[in-house]
Amino acid sequence: MSDELTHLDEQGRARMVDVGAKDATARTAVASALLRMQPETRARLVSGDVPKGDVLATARIAGIQAAKRTPELIPLCHAIALTSVEVHFELDAHDERVVHVRATARAKDRTGVEMEALTAVSIAALTLYDMLKAIDRGMTIEQIALEEKHGGKSGDWVR
């Protein structure tokens, strides 16, 4: 792991890293989050008994849109040509209070897609919260994390 802070110039000022000399390569990143809620809330989510409609479809679209807008939200991120963004939801088989959110971002570009995957999973989880808050304001969004990344100069990394 490098200790070099590439987003700072020689005077310590924030800057956008110049990736112009790098080759465009295939890049993939996977991020995850956990949404914890009351068992009754999850049961209503599963059954579709939610006042705001199709919660999972809306959260999936929100996550995809968020990934595409990452450089507008994170100041020093490059605009990259995403080739794919997928957002999936999984009910925890062992805990009736948990929904897992997972996002995968892919691109062929000069810089990685970690921030796009993390943004997608964060906004998808926030959208779930927004659409379910009338039922359960005590929900928590937990453990937002990069799970793996592939491609680029630094190669592969898996949590």
Image (tube, rainbow, N blue to C red):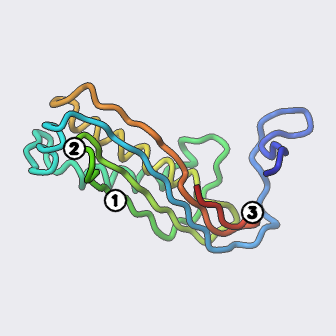
Answer left or right for 62 relative to 21: left
Residue 135 in percent (x, y) is at 15, 31
Label 2 secondary element: loop
Chain-order first, disc 3 or disc 2: 2
**Residue 49 % position (x, y):** 7, 44
Marking on residue 96: 2
The image position of residue 4, as x and y in percent, is 85, 45
Q: Which mark is residue 154?
A: 3
Picture quadrant of residue 109: bottom right
State whether residue 158 is above or below residue 100.
below
Nearer to us: label 2 or label 1: 2
Residue carrying label 1? 88
In the image, is 129 to the left or to the right of 51?
right
- Say what secondary structure mark 1 lies in: strand
Q: Is residue 124 rendered to the left or right of residue 54?
A: right
Residue 142: where, in percent of width, then height? 42, 37
